[in-house]
Amino acid sequence: MAETYDVAIIGSGPGGYAAAFRAAKYGLKAALIEKDAKLGGTCLHVGCIPTKALLFQAEVYETFKRAEELGITCKGFSYDWKKMLARKQAVVDKHARGLAGLERWAGTPGTVGGGIRGNAHFEEWLLGDRVARVGLVSRAGEPSEVTGAQMEFAYDDSRPRRTGEVVVWAEFRVEPGEPAHLREVAKASLRFRKRTQPLALPSAGCVFQNPQPGRDTLPSGVPASAGALIDRAGLKGCRIGGAQVYADPAARADEDARRITR
């Protein structure tokens, strides 16, 4: 059966796959068209990445040739073209495999800075667990660089929420992953968000916090889940004005505030 798409993107290079993810983020069904068997495009497989890898190796060899000028004695060196090509291909393969660790946040509405500030979570995964370093700017305009540990991440919380600092950049910890698997995880995440928070309608998103075991007292038999507590309290489907729990995400901010307070 033929499928219908909202947008077709030709080429799976850096521009193509970024455009496809952005289209999906805004609720469009995107088709990414690639003539080759592998995703990544010219840049990854035969252009920028392999060329720069070879250029770097050539620069190292050239530096050895000029070692005497630099006050370094280096004799008897040579290059092995087969090994240079193997190293170049290893660089390409590393990038072609994909980078794993952030795929579950595909389609998250918001910004990287906002996700870090609120330690965005998806199911049991926390974004803060992936943060290596963060660049901050204080209220006084003073820049600083801190580690993930210094960000004081907690559930829906972080250092900037208490200090008022602004996140200006971040470095994440990732590792090689198989592209097919990463795409499936990202697609599942997008499907979940589209199902629970329709992108075509105004939505407050996830505004309830799960209770914290050891800090919050829970009724007997109720798991540490905001959804379970809402069910137990009979608030599922509760409406105030245009705001409704779960059933209808269309709501004004003032109505959301009154519903949450209730």
Image: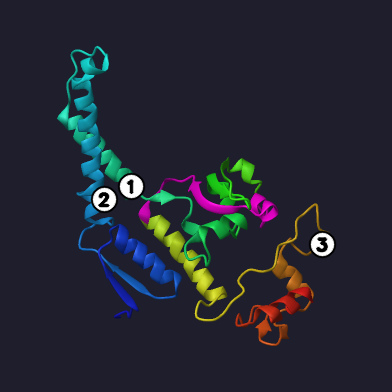
Of the numbered discs 3 and 1, the one sitting upstream in the chain is: 1
Q: Outermost residue, front direction?
A: 140
34 relative position to 223: left or right: left
Q: Could you tell me residue 124's position as x and y percent?
A: 61, 56
Q: Determine crowd level at label 2: few under 14, some 14-19, many 20+ residues with C-alpha closer than 10 A.
A: many
> Residue placed at 70% from the left, 88% from the top?
241
Crowding near the residue tagged with mark 1, few <14, some 14–19, many ≥20 C-alpha atoms within 10 Å? some
- Where residue 95 is drawn, which disc sits there? 1
Distance of mark 3 from mark 1, alpha carbons?
47 Å
Camera-side mark, 3 or 1 = 1
Q: Residue at x 66, y 49 (%)?
A: 159
Query: Please, is residue 56 above or below residue 210 in the view?
Result: above
Name the amino acid type tagged 1: His
Circle on res. 44: 2
CB of mark 1 within 8 Å of CB of mark 2? Answer: yes
Is residue 157 a member of the stretch shown in magenta?
A: yes
Q: Are marks 3 and 1 in contact (CB under 8 Å)?
A: no
For numbered disc 2, what is the local secondary structure? helix
User: Which amino acid type is marked by label 3?
Assistant: Leu
Residue 82, placed above or below residue 240: above
**Which residue lies under the disc numbered 3?**
218
Give the CA distance from mark 1 to mark 2.
8 Å
The span picked out in magenta is: 154-179
Picture quarter with the N terminus: bottom left
